[in-house]
Amino acid sequence: MTMPESIEAWQGSSFGGAKIALICDDGLLVYRRDDKPGIPHPNMWDLPGGGREDEESPVDCALRETYEEFGIVIPPERIEWQRRYVSREDSGVIGWFLAAKLAEDEIAQVRFGDEGQHWAVMEVIAFLGCSDAVAHLQYRLSDYIAWKKKGRRIGRMGDIRAT
């Protein structure tokens, strides 16, 4: 299967986890992280996703976490963008960021799990400008938005190539 230009192929290499931006029109599925000492980004707005289990792929990781956190199943073929990033916070660990469309009826099916305080659908632009959102996810989401709006592809090392 040939991957679309917007998807960086996972080559089976090790990574720490994956996050996914689920977008319905101008809305983004988010949740408020728990406000507990000792956890990363306490009380911040976050996106679905989390740590890798066993030998799962970035897609499998993000979709499993979405199901665990929100109770919804996103078909893997709906993912339209994925890219690997090197963590600045976690001593160079690789993390993957994905983006997919979310249908309105899927929002109605959300069953929030036991991690986090509550969930919401926030305007994408509001998340990008929010002072209490996880900053590196804002940056990664802005990469996706730039690709989407300009018809450009972001390559492996962050270089932008016209398509």
Image (cartoon, rainbow, N blue to C red):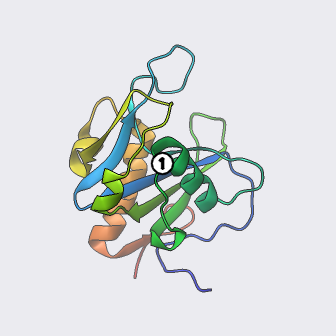
> Dividing the image into 4 quarters, which one contains the C terminus?
bottom left
Left/right placement of residue 144 relative to residue 157 reads left
Residue at the disc numbered 1:
71
Left/right placement of residue 38 relative to residue 35 reads right
Could you say which is closer to the camera, residue 117 or residue 161?
Answer: 117
The vertical placement of 73 against 128, above or below, is: below
Left/right placement of residue 145 relative to residue 3 reads left
Could you say which is closer to the camera, residue 86 or residue 23?
Answer: 23
**In the image, residue 126 lies at what x, y percent?**
22, 43
- Residue extending farthest to the top is 37
Q: Residue at x 62, y 53 (%)?
A: 61
- Which amino acid, mark 1? Gly
The vertical placement of 143 against 4, above or below, is: above
> Dividing the image into 4 quarters, which one contains the N terminus?
bottom right
Q: Residue at x 36, y 31 (%)?
A: 118
Query: Label 1: how many residues lie within 10 Å, few (<14), some (14-19) or many (20+)?
Result: some
Can the viewer see residue 159 in this picture? no
Can the viewer see residue 19 in this picture? yes
Q: Residue at x 57, y 16 (%)?
A: 38
Q: Residue at x 57, y 34 (%)?
A: 89
Q: For residue 131, what is the image quadrant?
A: top left
Q: For residue 31, what is the image quadrant?
A: top left
The vertical placement of 112 against 64, above or below, is: above
**In the image, residue 12 lies at what x, y percent?**
74, 64
- Residue extending farthest to the right is 54
